[in-house]
Image (cartoon, rainbow, N blue to C red):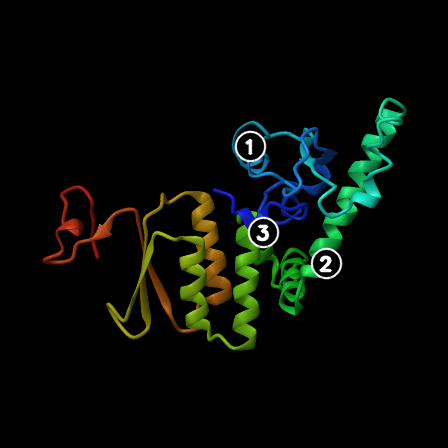
Amino acid sequence: MIKKDYSYLWYPLTNLVEVDNDRIKFKISSTISPYIELNLENLTKLSLELKSEFSNNEKIEIEINPFLRFPELFYFLNNPDLRKSKTKLKENLSNLIFHFLGNIDLYLGQNRKDIIVKEIIKDIENNCFGEKSKNLFVLFKEYEKYMVADIICSMYEQLGMIDSFRKVVKLVFKDSIIYDRLSSDTNLVLYLNYPKSKRNLGKVEFIKEIFLPLGLKLDIFWENHFGVIDVDITMKVGEIAVF
């Protein structure tokens, strides 16, 4: 479910929506509300479409109500006397203006950390963290990249490596458990209730490369949890991993 606070022009241009900005085509909405810029129904439809049919580079049309915040800019484009003239030109101009205004929204809404996080993402993609990290980073979704870079920023400023490791694991793999000192002081045991796919293996390898402190080893269990005495849910036949 998309939050009501996201029903503004800037939302489709963020990393929360996993689509290149040049595929987004804004247009003036045929239904104008005095209180809504980007209605929730439109956003929900966009979210569903991105998950299903948009696997190619087709343009994605998003309707905007420009009269909530930008009436002076768009009145002349929606003037009834001009509506039938140079339609294609007006559509292209509206799209360009919406993109411009949306990016201004994002720029003005950024704080110092937002800028640093975006620079960290660029640094990783430009090989500043090493070739291995660069190659593994592409396995993350766009919003995951932002979360990972945000934790890297926090790690440099105040958060220790082990706390950063714990936090990034829980953000990327929500259904996970980290056991501290279960087998020794130099081993962490990580349970991930996810398939042991190539993508997930790569994500874990990236997290280890960036966040796991030197000297610590990681034992990983995928899908099947190891048995814990007196905890029935972990003692099911055929669903127990050997530890």
Q: In this view of the protein, which residue sits in the foreground, 198 or 101?
A: 101
CA distance separating discs 2 and 1 = 26 Å
Task: In the displayed orientation, state which residue is furthest to the top.
Answer: 84
Rendered residue at 54%/47% (across/down): 4
> Which residue is the site of mark 2?
107
Please say whether residue 75 is visible from this viewpoint: yes
Rendered residue at 78%/37% (across/down): 95
Residue 234: x, y in percent?
17, 51
Callout 2 amino acid: Tyr
Task: In the displayed orientation, state which residue is furthest to the left.
Answer: 230
Q: Which is nearer the N-term, disc 2 or disc 3?
A: 2
Callout 3 amino acid: Asn
> Which residue is the site of mark 1?
45
Residue 196: x, y in percent?
37, 45
> Which residue is the site of mark 3?
135
Q: In this view of the protein, which residue sits in the foreground, 193 or 15?
A: 15
